[in-house]
Image (cartoon, rainbow, N blue to C red):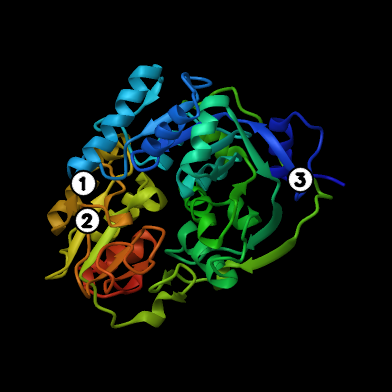
Amino acid sequence: MGMTITEKILAAHAGLEAVAPGQIINARLDVALGNDITAPLAIKAFREIGATKVFDRNKVILVPDHFTPNKDIQSAEQCRLMREFAQEQGLTHYLEVGRMGIEHALLPEMGLVGPGYLVIGADSHTCTYGALGAFATGVGSTDLAAAMAIGEIWLRVPETIKFVYTGHRQPWVGGKDLILYTIGAIGVDGALYKAMEFTGETIRNLDMAGRFTMANMAIEAGGKNGIIHPDEITLEYLRGRMEKGYTLYHSDEDALYAEIREYDCSQIEPQVACPSSPANVKGVRGLAGITIDQAIIGSCTNGRLEDLRIAAHIIQGKKVAPYVRLIVIPATQEIYLQALREGLLEAFVEAGGAVSTPTCGPCLGGHMGVLGAGEVAIATTNRNFVGRMGHPTSQVYLSNPAVAAASAIKGEIVHPEEVANKE
């Protein structure tokens, strides 16, 4: 019996010829990642177990991105603990404000993760790197502490669900819509502790930004990881970022899957996840008349340059609706700089939007866009649970960048076609 791409990566990192679902393995790590919320707890546990040195100063990566730039004394102290630990351990990759970005956009951009890697991070959206053909999953801070010390992680090999996407995508439909549609179909626990393998002609024609978005939200379906076979689009993305040191794995034709699901993408319109679950998904045309107070374009899900280009195309030459706040957050400094050079930021500011330095900020209700009582937001983020972005009575709708941008202009949730190319 053959193996899936996930099983092959885990077998290789466990030093085994083969693994099977349900098997418990110890696997060596290529990257162990922490941020300003999770790393301080991991550092405390690291010291409590008597560890004195990280297993590899090149493979432990710390990124302050959630409450940065520091919003208060507590967040400043969290980052101070990280910074001092990074200096003490001589970490190669401690990415400070001004040179950092939202971690799950930053690491691929810097060539720090690649195909065939085994990556753990004390952040649930670590699964993003599966877009490159890596096995990447989130862990708790105590797991990160042990990983920083010994460079290994124990895992139960997950079963795999194969998702096959076919058909030509409709206008304004991207990776966000495909993954929202999928989560809507299977529910927030539909892939619980399973690998979500995304494949099919539609995926093969999807750019890396869309692939990152899909892998990023595997956790919203309960997935252990999301993964896409590396191909020429992957290799083109890696050129100039990571020229070697990775391995390309692909599932065998006779690999065993727990389930195979197929979707005709030509039938999928832009999708919106309604409060208060990523699985409460509807087509955008079914949400006419829902007014908004705030629109957020950014996050590890949709803060990439391609996302900003789409949003700017919608917004160019128009104005944000009265009494609506538009907040745009490029995911990394490199993206920010390129968006500046292309005039994208100018389009947002001239429309009446605010542009922030890279931060997770409003996605987790941290800062830079926290919602008040009863306020409604549409966001390109990944979660919309009760209180996720602020007050418990606020509401968050999740969408792609085109829908969010169009809604900011109209002041209510609309299909992008109602705004694009109109004066």
Nearest to N terminus: mark 2 or mark 3: 3
Query: Residue 317: horizontal and vertical position, in percent?
Result: 18, 59
> In the image shown, does 234 or 4 lie closer to the viewer?
4
The residue singled out by tag 1 in the image is 356
Do the CB atoms of the residues marked 1 and 2 lie less than 8 Å apart? yes
Q: Amino acid at mark 3?
A: Gln
Q: Residues within 10 Å of mark 1 (few under 14, many from 20)?
A: some
Indicate the amino acid at tag 2: Ile
386 vs 141, nearest the viewer: 141
N-terminal of the pair, mark 1 or mark 2, is 2
Q: Which residue is mark 3?
A: 23
Residue 200 to residue 281: above or below:
above
Pinpoint residue 295: horizontal percent, then vertical percent: 25, 63
Number of marks drawn: 3
Relative to residue 54, is residue 249 drawn left or right?
right
- Answer with left or right where residue 75 lies relative to residue 267: left
